[in-house]
Amino acid sequence: MREVADLIELSGALQDLNVSTDEYVRLLGYPRGHVLDGRARELADWARDWYAKNGRPWFYARQAENFEISGESVRIDGVSFTSKRLQKTLEQAQAHSVVLVAVGAGSEAEREAGLRWKDEKPDEYFFLEVFASAVVEYLATTIGARLCDWAEQHSMAVLPHYSPGYPEWDVSEQQPLLDLLKLTRTTEFPSHVEVFETGMLRPKKTLLAVFGLTRHTDQLRRLTSLVPCENCSFGPCQYRRAPYKRAPRLWGEQVTPRIASLDQNAEYTTNRRALKRWAAERLSMKKNQDGSLDAVFRYDGTTCTNMGRPLTFNYSLKLGSRAEGYPILEQRCVPAEGDAGHTAMCKYIEDPAALMADIDLEKPLKGERLNTVLSWLRKPSAAGCYCEKSSRDHKWGLVLETIHYSLAQEEITHDTERS
């Protein structure tokens, strides 16, 4: 740990990596309390062992030299960021400074996973990819714990971290945040990281974040959503100063901690801005009395031939309740009423009955929880038609990711209102 002019700066590689088995199992998509066995246990152990020998996890953190909230933006070292959620958190806690943090699982696991995929070993690819995601979560939590320990020694408290791509913070601001992070004081930035136009980072198992700092610890006791430690569910943290708990809704009434049914910080294959737009414009959902959900998604595309004839398909789904993890109970894809464009597709012209039967019979992930879409391996396809299975799978992926995104945002809003 280095401190420069009383401003904290941390950099290096984490030697003792102890990713929680429960967190790894959760990210793999298994239900809470599930115990891996058989082939799954073999793959999980292999991924953990491979990473222990070859992975290069890293971290960097530095306290900003200048910080202010001006109008509707947060200015950090002279750079403006726009995030209503981050700004509200910092204002409520009367934050006086922020710490910029970057963590990464390194590029080694990403390269190895890519090789496994090329070798047609999707299981090894998936388990290694997920373990690298678990490493990123572990790194963020561990650095947060170190900051908590440092802050307490200086009569301060650390606020929950926030990142571009989270709700109410556009992912396009990854680039200016990364540029700020690279303005190190006493050490070089520990890893090569770059940002694509979509906001995606490379290596992709990388996280950029902002932690707020406040001296008003008494204020945090009145803001239950920001109480350090009491708001953190990471049980084995050696720096814990208070037990994790939820504030009671009414005097004397205890509330059971609410467990998210969906990964609220999911990594989608689709840009979040597109998912947000589709959720608003193309998706409609209705909640039933038994807690189940009916969802309809409208897909507009074009044929790849015949001068690109427009076509529209409706995707209808029934999902189980939130308590069950939103299992996919029913799903169907059919041309929209009055659509004629689908009849101009090549495969339809060749054999209409066969193509429409394939479309009707395909129900990917039926019976699985909605969160499973995050780990569904499917071939990318930009085709707007439905002639090939890869194209149909691609569209189902877009539909399920949009529904996942919409429901995850509802969970985040619900949790914020409850806090």
Image: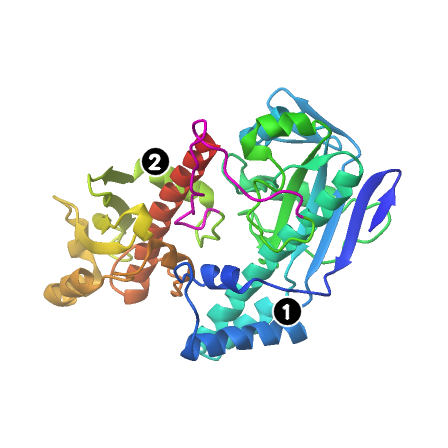
Please check the rendered image and state whether residue 342 is part of the magenta-colored stretch, yes or no.
no
Residue 327 appears in the figure: yes
In the depicted view, which residue is nearer to us: 283 or 365? 365
Check disc 1 and report its element: helix, strand or loop: helix
N-terminal of the pair, mark 1 or mark 2, is: 1
Residue 344 vertical position relative to residue 213 in the rendered view, above or below = below
Q: Which residue is mark 2?
A: 280
- Disc 2, SS: helix
Q: Nearer the viewer, residue 392 or 345?
A: 392
Is residue 73 in sight in this rendering? no
In this view, the residue farthest toward the right is 5
Which residue is denoted by mark 1 in the rendering? 108
The kind of residue on which mark 2 rests is Ala
Q: Give x and y (percent) for residue 303.
A: 26, 54
Instruction: Please provide percent x and percent y for residue 196.
Output: 58, 51
Looking at the rendering, the stretch of residues picked out in magenta corresponds to: 240-264
On screen, 328 above or below 272?
A: below
Please check the rendered image and state whether residue 247 is part of the magenta-colored stretch, yes or no: yes
Q: Which quadrant of the view contains residue 67? A: top right
54 on left or right of 169: right
Q: Verify CB contact (< 8 Å) between mark 1 and mark 2.
A: no
**Percent position (x, y) of residue 419?**
49, 32
